[in-house]
Image (tube, rainbow, N blue to C red):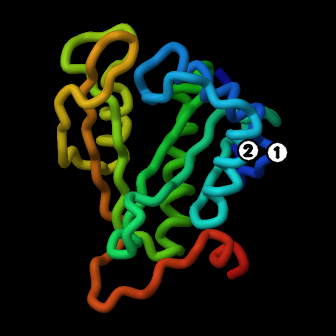
Amino acid sequence: MTHSPLTIRTATPDDAAPLLAIYAPYVTKTAITFEYEVPNEEEFRRRIQTTLEAYPYLVAERGGKIIGYVYASAFHTRPAYDWNVETSIYIAEEARHTGAGRKLYEALETYLRAQGIVTLYACITYPATPDPYVDTNSVDFHSHMGYDLVANFKKSGYKFDRWYDVVWMEKEIGAHWAPMAPVKRFPEILDQ
């Protein structure tokens, strides 16, 4: 199967509708996200704009169609955590296993390194037993991307009338120095 070239670019709030179309099935059909209700387009626009004030929010396009997106968010709000982020990625169902996820994460890491981020964290729903709403693909993907499993919280999320474990995975992409330079906001590195 031949694919048209993959293009990765910074998201804009105007991408809210196609990104929400990718995200909505994750809310309604899976336990991958613990949101119960699909947010409306205005809320999704707000989320994109808020993220872009500090962190990368990237989309992957193939043939002019958005097929996935990735973004970073604060790992914690206290300043001692500034050099860490949580990563999130969502790929359209028909575009899974095409390499788009890997390309999105590689682009995200490039920007995060330029910002001065040193550690990435991924919070992932994990089924304790085989489950119709979630599998181990996300853990496998993050392992292939160099993340290590660092924590497993038992039965910490409740969706679809069942309890789910949540695992945290971690990847270091920079050096831990003392003193550390301040982290740059995403718009600052775009001007360089």
**In the image shown, does 118 or 43 lie closer to the viewer?**
43
User: What is the number of the mark on residue 163?
Assistant: none
N-terminal label among 2 and 1: 1
Q: Is residue 20 visible?
A: yes
In the rendered structure, the answer to whether residue 66 lies left or right of residue 130 reads right
**In the image shown, does 14 or 38 lie closer to the viewer?**
38
Task: Identify the residue at image location x=51%, y=40%.
Answer: 89
> Callout 2, which amino acid?
Arg
Secondary element type, mark 1: helix
Q: Is residue 105 above or below residue 127?
A: below
In the rendered structure, the answer to whether residue 75 lies left or right of residue 115 reads left
Q: Give percent across and percent down for residue 77.
A: 42, 64
Based on the displayed image, in which of its 4 quarters is residue 5 positioned? top right
- Dividing the image into 4 quarters, which one contains the N terminus? top right
Task: Identify the residue at image location x=27%, y=23%.
Answer: 164
Secondary element type, mark 2: helix
> Callout 1, which amino acid?
Asp
Task: Identify the residue at image location x=30%, y=13%.
Answer: 162
Mark 2 vs mark 1: give the one in front. Answer: 2
Q: Residues within 10 Å of mark 1 (few under 14, many from 20)?
A: few
In the rendered structure, the answer to whether residue 82 lies left or right of residue 155 reads right
Which residue is denoted by mark 2 in the rendering? Answer: 45
Compute the Cα span from label 2 to label 1.
7 Å
Q: Residues within 10 Å of mark 2 (few under 14, many from 20)?
A: some
User: What is the number of the mark on residue 14?
Assistant: 1
**In the image shown, does 40 or 104 lie closer to the viewer?**
40
Q: Give percent across and percent down for residue 175.
A: 31, 77
Q: Badges 2 and 1: C-beta atoms under 8 Å apart? A: yes
